[in-house]
Image (spheres, coloured by chain):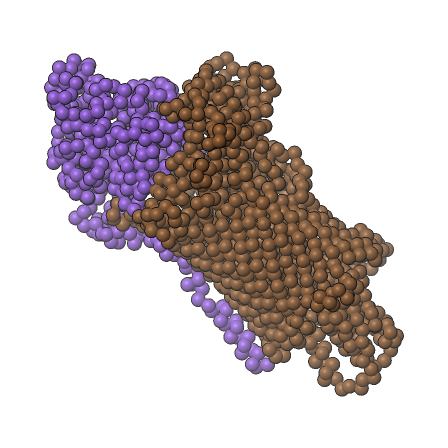
Chain colours: A brown, B purple
Amino acid sequence: MNQFQFSRRLVISAFLLLVSTVSVFSQSVIKGTIIDEVTKEPLSGASIYAKDEKVGAITDAKGSFGIKISKYPLRIHISFVGYKEKDIICNSSEDLLQISLAENHQVLNDIVVIGYGTQSRQNVTSAISSVKSETFKDVPVNSFDQVLQGRSSGVQLTSPSGNLGTAPIIRIRGVASITSGTSPLYVVDGIPIQSGNLSYSGDINVLSDINPDDIQSIDVLKDASAGALYGSRAANGVVLITTKKGTKGRAKVSYNGWVGISSPVKYYDVLNAEQFVDVKNEAVKNHYGTDQYSLSKSTATTDGSKAFNLGYDANGKVIDTDWNKYVFQNGIQQSHAVAVDGGNDRVQYHISTNYLDQSGILKGDKYSRLGTSFSVDAQANKWLKVGGTQTISLSNQQTADRSRGGNITAYSALSRLAWADAPNIAAYNADGTPYQEQGHLGYGPNTVQAPLDNPVAIINSKSFVNTENIRWLSNYYGELTPIKNLTLRTQYGKDFARIEDRDFHSPTTVNGYSQNGVATNVSTRSSQYTWTNTANYKLYLGHNNFDFLAGSEISERNYKYWGSTRSTLVDASYNIYEASYKNITAIDSKISESGMVSYLARVNYDYDSRYILSANYRRDGYSALSKNHRWGNFGGVSGAWRVSDEAFFKPLKNIFSDLKLKASWGVVGNTKIDDYASKSYYSSGYYGTDGTYILGQVGDSENLKWETSKKFDAGFSTLLWNNINIDFDYYRNVSSDLILQVPVSPSEGIPNNYITSNAGGMRNSGLELSISANIINKKDFTWYSSFNITTNKNVVTNLSENMSQLITAGNGESTNITMVGKSIGQLYLYPTQGIDPATGRRIFTGNDGTKVLMEYEKSNKFYTEDGTAYSQSNLSRVVAGNTLPTWYGGWANNFKYKNLDMSVLFQFSGGNKIYNGSTATLSDVRFWNNSVEYKNKYWTAERTNAKYALPIYGDNYSNGSALPITDWVENGDYVRLKNISLGYTLDQKTILKTLGLSTLRIYLQAQNLFVLTGYSGLDPEVLSQTQSPNLNGGTDHNTAPQARTFTFGAQITF
Amino acid sequence: MKRIYIILQILIATSLVSSCDSILNKEPVLQTTESNVFSSADKIKSNLLGIYSDAKGQIALKGAAYTDIRGEDVASLSSNVFECYTVYEMAVGLTTTDNSDTWSKLYTVINESNTFLANLDNAKDVAGSSYSQYVSEAKFLRALSYYYLNTLYAYSYSADSTAKSVPLRLKAESSTADNNLARSTVAEVYTQILSDLSESNIAALPNAGNTYDGITRASQAAARVLKQRVYMEKNDWKDAITQGEAITGYQLLDKVSLIFTNDINKEVIFSFPMSSTNKGGDQTALAYYYHSGNIFILDNTYGFLSKPNYSLSYDTRIKDLVSTANSNRILTKYTDYQTYLDWVPVFRYAEVELNLAESYYNNNQLDKAREALKQVRHRSIVAELDPLDIDNLSSSDLKTAIYNERRAEFVGEGIRSLDIHRRGENFVKRNGTFTPSTNGYIWPIPTSERSVNNLITD
C-alpha cells in the first residue's frame, strides 16, 4: 500500500470516528451505488463525502453506501483511485441512487511513489515514470522488470536472448558508469533489494522471486531530484515497487491464471546432409586440389573416400539430421495466482500465492516458482500503526545452454550446436543412445572431427545447471503519529536468498568425457538488511504547504558461497552430485561484506500547488571505499511552476488545462563496485601440498572515492483540452570519478594488471517525450493511447591517463572498444570491404589502406593484390559503430468495445549497430555446418558478386570466425509488436451469480508477434555478452533467438 | 506529549548511534595484509611458495605445451585457439591471448619475487636462518621467468646478442607511476639471470634431491641446470660444462617412464608438483593435450619418429611412453587426464648429461660428448642392439645424434623449440617452414604492454 492510500484511509477512519461521536439528530439515511461509467461494474472502496455535513462513507463490495444527512440541497464529493472525481448537488435521495464514475486515464492526479514517501503527481517536480499493474496484467513474464520495455519513458530494456529466465539489461537514461554496475536500484515497499544474478553457476534473475501479480505499481525515478534520497545508489536510476495491499471491505478472493506456448521467432536455415557434404568437399577440393582427401583421420572412413561423405543408417537411408529439432522446442507455460484481500477499519490484509511453471524454447530450459506473499497493515490505536509484508518464494531454474552469460564458444552452447553440428551424423545410435565419439559429436562419415557436443547427449544425460533459490523478502514497519501531521516511522527489511546450484556434465558430453562425469554443487547465501528511521512532518500555513522528512538508515550485505566439484563417476548411469565419484575438489569459497550508514533529509514545499520546490540531502558512508573518502554528500533541488494557475494564463486555459514547468539538479552516486575494491591484500592458496600466501590485489586504499553523477533535468508537463497529457524532459547526466580498473603495464606484474582507481568520466543527455490521450471516449467504445520516445547520447569523456581506450573482450571474443569522445562499447572490428569479385577472396584493409586478400591456403594467409605477403600485424581493428540505442520508446493502445477490451503495445529502438557474429559461425569453412544462405552466396567463378569468400577448407578467417570483421555490422533499428491482447469481460449478472463469481474476464495474448527490421540475424534485440552488456554490447554471436509466446488466461474475482 | 518525545528520542538515538564502525570497516575475510604475512616465519615461507605456485601456473601448464608445440615433434589436430592453436600455427600476434597471458604471468612471478625480496629485507629477523635461502629461491624464480621471456620474445643470443628483449623489472611495483620501462638487450637479460644465479646465491640453496622439498623448490642443482642452459645460449661451452659437471647426487633411473610414474625420484632435479587443490584443468593440463590423440599427437612425418634410429620398437621410451589413440601416435608421459595430477618436470639429470654432450661437442671434447650421449641413449636402448654406432660417428653425425637424442629423450618436456631457437635454426614442421625472419618465430611484445608502457619500441 502506498502512503497516500494509507493516509486517505486514516482520514476516512477519522471521519467515521467523527460520525460515530457527533451527536445524532439524524433525519434520514440515504443509500446509493457507485458504478463504473463504462462497464457498469460496482466500485468497491469509493469514498463519498458530504462537505456541508462533514460526513462520509465508503462503498462496500457491491458498490453500495449509506450516508446520514439532515438537509438538502447537499454537495457531495465522490472519489476513487483511478477515476475522475465527481461533485454533485444532491437535491433528493433520488440523485444518489446510482452515480457513475469515469476512469481517469490522465495520470495528473495519480499518486506517485517517491523515495521514502508518496506525492501527488501534480506536485511532482522531478522525473518519474509510473507503470501501473493494470497495464501489464495480461503479460506473461516471470519477472516484473521485463514489463518496463516500451511502457516507461527513459527506460531502455534489452532482453538479451530467448533463453528462459535471463535478466533483461535495463538502462535508465543511458549508462552512468563504465565498469561499475549500471543496473538501477530496486526498492520494494521502501526496502532496497538485491537484483541481478546471485547464483554461482546458474544464470538467474532474482527479481523473478517477486510475483508480478503482487505488484500494484512500478515507479521509475530518473533524475537526481527524485533519486537523491537514495543518494549513493541512484546513479543508474531507482525502480520503486509497490506491492498490493489489503483494502477495507468484505474479503475478496481473486484468481489470475494463464497457460501459454512459446516458440522461437526465427530459425537459421542450415544445410542438409547432402548440401553439407557437397559444400565441404568443394572447400576441400579448393584447398588440396582433390576431395579424395583425409583431413586428419589417418584411416579412411568406411562410408566413402572423400573428406566428407554421406552416412547411411541400418536401413540404408541417408543420415540427415536437422539439429535445430534437437535444440529448439515449443515451450509450455502455466501460471496460477490466487489472492485474498480484505480488512476492516483497523486491519487490512493481502494474502497471495502463485505457481508458475515454464519450459523454454531451448530444450532443457525450465523455470518454476511457488511463492506466497502475506501483508498486513494494522491501526493499533490512534497513534500507532504497524504492518509488514512477507514474501517467500521457492524457485527452480534449469538450463542446458552453456552460452548463457556470454560464453559464446562453449562446446555446449546449444544454439551453436543447432547451427554448427554436422548434419550427416546421426543424433542417435541404432540402440537409441545419443551418437558421440569420446564426448564429441565426432567423425561420423567424415575425416575430420566435429568437436562440439551432440545436443541430444546433453539433454538425455541431464547435463544441466539447476539452480534452486529460496528467497525471503521480509519487511516490518511501525508508524507513530504522536501529533497531527507528524509521522515517525521505523522500518526494517531483510532480503535473504539461499541458492543451490547443481551443475552436471555427463561422460557423454565434451565437458564430462575426459573426467568421466563432473558434478559441481555450490551453495550461495546472500543476505542484506536495511533499517530505516524517518520522521515526517507536514505543515500547512494558508496556501503554503510544507512536507519535511529527516531520517537515518543503515544497511549491511553479506554474500558468500562454498561448494565442490566431484569427478569420475563410479557408475556412469548417475547424473547427480550425491552419487559416488572418485575425486572431489573444493571450489574457491567467497565471503564478501559491505555496509552503509546514511543520513537523509528532504523538504517539499508548494504554494497552492502552483509554485513547488523540493530539496533533499543525503550523506552516505560506504565500506568499499577508502577510509579517507568513504563519506559522500548527495542531494538535489527541484522546482516547478504551475503556469496554468496564474491569472495571466486564463485566456489559454481552454487549451491548456494544466501546464507545469519544472527543473531539477542533483548529485548521486554508485555503490555497485566490488566490496573490497580499495583494499590491498594477500590471498591464500596451495603449492603442491603446502599452503601459500600471494599478493592478490593492489588497491588504491588511500584515495578511492565515490563515483558521482550530476544530473540535470528540465521540462514541462501539460494537459491539453482536459484530455491530452504531454510530458517533455531534457536531461543531462555528467558522471565523474568513475571507478575503473586502470591498467598498469603488465610487465609491472601487479595482480590482474590493474589498480582500481577513480579515473573515468561520462556524459548522457537526451530528450524524453510522452503523450497520452483518450482518442475516443464513447459509451461503448474507448481508445486510450500513450506514446513515449526517449533519445540518448552517451559520450565517454575521460578514461585514465595511461588508457586512451579500453579494449574489452567478452567471453570468447573481443569485439568492443571504449574510448574518449565516443559512446561506451563501440564495435571494434577488422576492416573489410566485401569479396573481391576477381579472386573470390575477402578484402581486408591494412593499416596503410592497402587492400589485402585473405588466402587461407597459403602460409602467410594475407597477401596484397600483387601477391606479396602482408604481415598480419599490419591489420588493425577499427571503430565500427555505436552499440547503445540512441532512441527508443513504445506506443501503447487500449481499446474497449462493450465487453471486449484489447491492448496493443508496440516497442521500438534504434540508432545502434550490431555485429552479427552468428553469420561467422554459419559461414565458417571448417568442420562446421553452414547456412543455406552461405551455400547460395559464396564466391564461385560464375557467381562473382558474393557475400562469402571462395570456400577453402579450414578457412576460419575470411568469414569472421578468427578475426571479427566489419562486413558483418548491421543496423539495429526495429519496431516490435511486443504484446497484443484481447479480453472479454462477462457481465451477464445471472450467469455470474449462478457461477458464484463477481467478475470474470478471459483473454488471449501474444508476445513478439512480429518485428520490423532490416537486421538479417534472428532478432535485432540481442546481446550475447550479458555479463558486460555495456562494454561488450552490440554483438550477436551464437545467441538463442527470441521467443514468441501465446497465452490464454482468465481473471476471476469471487 | 511527554511520552511521544521519549519515543522520538529513543528512535533517533538508536538509529544514529548504531555502531558505524563495524558497519563501515569491512576487511576481506578470506585475505590478509602484507604486514601480517611478513610478521611470521611460516607466512613468509607461504609467500615464497606462492611465487612457486604462480610460476607453475605458467611454466608447467600452458607454457610447457607451448615450447613443445612450436617444435616439429609434436603436432596439433586442434584448431581451437584456446588449445595452443595460434602457437602451433606460429601465428602469435600482438593481441593473441597466449601471448598476453604468458607475458603477464611471467612478469607476475617477477614482481612477486621483487616484492618478496623487498619485504624480506625488512623482515630479516622474522625469516631468521632461512633468510639467505629465501633470497636465493626468489632470485631463482625471477631468473627462470626471465629465461623464458628472453627465449620467447627475442632472437637468440647467438643470432643477435644486442637485439631488444624484454624490460628488466628488478624492484617491487605497486603503482601506476612506473608504467614506462624500455627493453633491455638479450645480453643484458642473460647478465641479470647470471647475477641472480651467482655462485654465492647458489651456495645458499640446499643441495638435496629425491625429497619433496628438494625437487619442488630451488636447489643448487636446479640453479646450475638453468645456468647451464644460459651459458649454452651464450655459446659459452666451457662455463656450461663447469656448471654441468658441478651437479652431483643425481642419477639416471633405469627407465625414463619411472620419472613419470614416481614423481619424487633421483633423476628429477626440479619439478612442479600438482595436487587436488592446485593443478591444471581442461585446456591447460598436459594430460588434456596428450592423452586423447585428438589434440597433441607425435608427428610421424616431421618428428623424430620419422627417423629409423629414433623409433625403435625396443627403445623403452617408445615401448613405455608412446602409444596409439584415435589412430594417432601419442605420448604417454602425462596420462592422468581424469584428475590432472601429473607433475611437470622442468629439469632432470638426463638433461644435464645431454647438455654436457652438446657442450663437450662444441668444446671439441668429442669423446666426452660420445660418453654423455651413450649414458642417456643406452639407458633406453640396450647398447648391443643399438643400430647407432656412437663410437664411430663422424663429428657432424655425432652432432646430429646429440641433437636427435635430445628430441627423443625430452619430447613433451618443453625443450625442443628452445633448442631450435637457441641454435637459430628454422622450424620445419607439418604446417610450414618458419625462418627466424618469419612473423611468429619470436613473439611480439603484446599490445597490452605497448598500450601502457610508452617506452616499448620494436
Does A901 sit left or right of A377 as displayed? right
Identify whether A363 is placed above or below B143. Answer: below
Identify whether A416 is placed above or below A704. Answer: above
On the question of residue B192 being in view, the answer is no
Q: Quadrant of residue A120?
A: bottom right
Q: Quadrant of residue A82?
A: bottom right
Which quarter of the figure is the C terminus of chain A placed in? bottom right
Identify whether A114 is placed above or below A436. Answer: below
Q: Residue at x 36, y 18 (%)?
A: B433
On the question of residue A268 being in view, the answer is yes
Q: Nearest the camera: A330 or B248? A: A330
Which quarter of the figure is the N terminus of chain A placed in? bottom right
Does B272 sit left or right of A1042 as displayed? left
Q: Residue at x 54, y 38 (%)?
A: A325
Image spot of residue A315 (x, y percent): 48, 31
Image spot of residue A282 (x, y percent): 50, 20
Q: Residue at x 56, y 22 (%)?
A: A938
Q: Quadrant of residue A954?
A: top left
Identify whether A545 is placed above or below A663. Answer: below
Image spot of residue A896 (x, y percent): 77, 54
